[in-house]
Image (cartoon, rainbow, N blue to C red):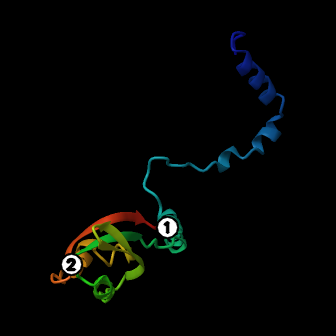
Amino acid sequence: PDDKFKHLQRWWKHINSFSVTERSQWGADEVEEVDLFGEPTQEEKAQVQALMDKAKQAQKKVVAKSNIIWDVKPFDNTTSLILVEEKVRSIKMKGLEWKASRLIDVAFGIKKLQIAANIIDDLVSTDSVEEKILENVDLIQSIDVFAFNKLS
């Protein structure tokens, strides 16, 4: 090698410092060709599939839940909010769990019911719960979502 390639020259001297017998033991004949752009073998495909299956088993299914607080407004000031709450809590659906409630003053002695529920998003639609609540037309004037929070 030329003097301008100092690193190559150093490598060349290092390699030539070994005898021919030492260099023959390096196993140049045993080099396995690797096809970087070829199709994966059946063994490689099986290994990848096994790793993917193991990862899927280790992965827990996340159940999406939400917490909703509804404002339920009575039909008039003579409507019993205790009866309204009983009617609302009587709604049963898979994935629906009623939580705390309270009565809130609106104005001039009129109160509204504020009630919370936890739902599993895949099982319960908020629209269907609201429709069931509003089926009590003789007791309930309207319903609004006060808060909607994701739990998980």
Q: Residue at x 36, y 64 (%)?
A: 148
Q: Earlier in the sequence, mark 2 or mark 1?
A: 1
Q: Taking 139 as reference, is 19 left or right?
A: right
Q: Which residue is mark 1?
A: 52
Q: Which residue is mark 2?
A: 140
Nearest to the eye among marks 2 and 1: give it: 2
Residue 56 picture location, percent across and down: 49, 71
Q: Secondary structure at mark 2?
A: strand
Residue 109 picture location, percent across and down: 29, 72
Q: Quadrant of residue 150?
A: bottom left
Along the line of sight, which residue is nearer the eye, 12 or 87? 87
C-alpha gap between disc 2 and disc 1: 53 Å
Residue 139 picture location, percent across and down: 20, 82
Q: Residue at x 80, y 36 (%)?
A: 20
Residue 113 picture location, percent across and down: 33, 75
Along the line of sight, which residue is nearer the eye, 64 or 8? 64
Q: Label 1 neighbourhood size at 10 Å, few (<14), some (14-19), many (20+)?
A: few
The kind of residue tagged 2 is Ile
The kind of residue tagged 1 is Met
Q: Which mark is residue 115?
A: none
Q: Taking 88 as reference, is 45 left or right?
A: right
Q: Taking 72 as reference, is 9 left or right?
A: right
Q: Taking 150 as reference, is 128 left or right?
A: left
